Amino acid sequence: MFDPSWWPWTLGALALALPTLVHQAATGKVIGVSSLYARMIGWADEAEAAATEARTADRSEAELAQLLEAETAAMVATLDPDELGISEAELAAMLAECDTEATPPAAPEATDRPCPPAAARVHPLVHLVFLVAMVGGGALAAVASGRWGLRFTLSDAYTRLVADGAAGLGLLFLGGAMVGLGTRMAGGCSTGHGLQGTAALQPGSLVSTITFFGTAVAVSTILGVLP
């Protein structure tokens, strides 16, 4: 059976860092599991944003300014004084005051110059393939190392150190929710910060990686010494 102990940690670090840096250099985008998952969930918003960029890609700045003015006027027309808790006269006075105080935007230097083309967006299927490949790669590595096993119960170490039964499942769910919350607060997960960010030597990613790995080591040490 395959023995992974021969693989030096330096080569492992390079094998993890180089693909992320090459991906960023080739596509201009960073790799992160949490961001890919968010894009999979919000595929409709991604598609709408891509359609909007496509509609505005070949328009000049003057045309975009007129479009923005028209959309703003349409939005103002939908205002209901009853919902705002004011009278129609008060709403009219408020809008007139806003028009008076508003500073008109500076005219563009070249009105016939088209806007930059919209950035190409990755198809949601690419994100799905990436996520599925991660799970499949982990399963393949487990099979190759002889550690593959399918079980529907909590591990012996988890039940011994944390809890068993419903309490253990509840704490596991709470821990997963806290991981998700921390991921959003930190602006990335262990993949985004630990691989992409640290490989690019980004200060925020270095601090985040030190924080969550240090916390994991501290919690594991505390659990290990508990009776």
Image (cartoon, rainbow, N blue to C red):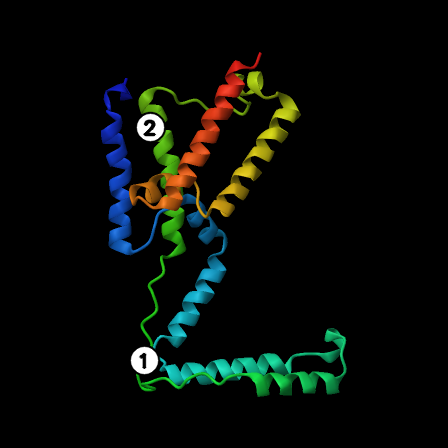
Q: Measuring from the top left, give residue 4's x and y in whole percent.
A: 28, 22
Number of marks in picture: 2
Q: Quadrant of the C terminus?
A: top right
**Other residues around mark 2 within 10 Å, as few (<14) / some (14–19) / many (≥20):** some
Q: Tag 1's secondary structure?
A: loop
For the point 47% across and 45% down, the residue is: 186
**Other residues around mark 1 within 10 Å, as few (<14) / some (14–19) / many (≥20):** some
Residue 202 image label:
none
Quarter holding residue 94: bottom right
Q: Measuring from the top left, give residue 188's x and y in whole percent.
A: 44, 45
Residue 114 image label:
1
Return the disc, 1 or 2, that comes first in the chain's sequence: 1
Relative to 153, is 30 above or below? below
Left/right placement of residue 198 relative to residue 36 reads: left
Left/right placement of residue 104 relative to residue 137 reads: right
For the residues bearing labels 1 and 2, Cβ distance under 8 angstroms: no
Say what amino acid the circle numbered 1 marks. Pro
For the point 41% across and 44% down, the residue is: 33
Q: Is residue 63 visible?
A: yes
Relative to 86, is 186 above or below? above
Q: Measuring from the top left, give residue 66's x and y in whole percent.
A: 46, 85
Say what amino acid the circle numbered 2 marks. Ala
Quarter holding residue 51: bottom left
Q: Nearer the viewer, mark 1 or mark 2?
A: 1
The residue indicated by pointer 2 is 141
Q: CA distance from mark 1 to mark 2?
A: 50 Å
Q: Quadrant of the N terminus?
A: top left
Nearer to the camera, 69 or 206 = 206
For the point 57% across and 84% down, the residue is: 101
Q: Is residue 190 visible?
A: no
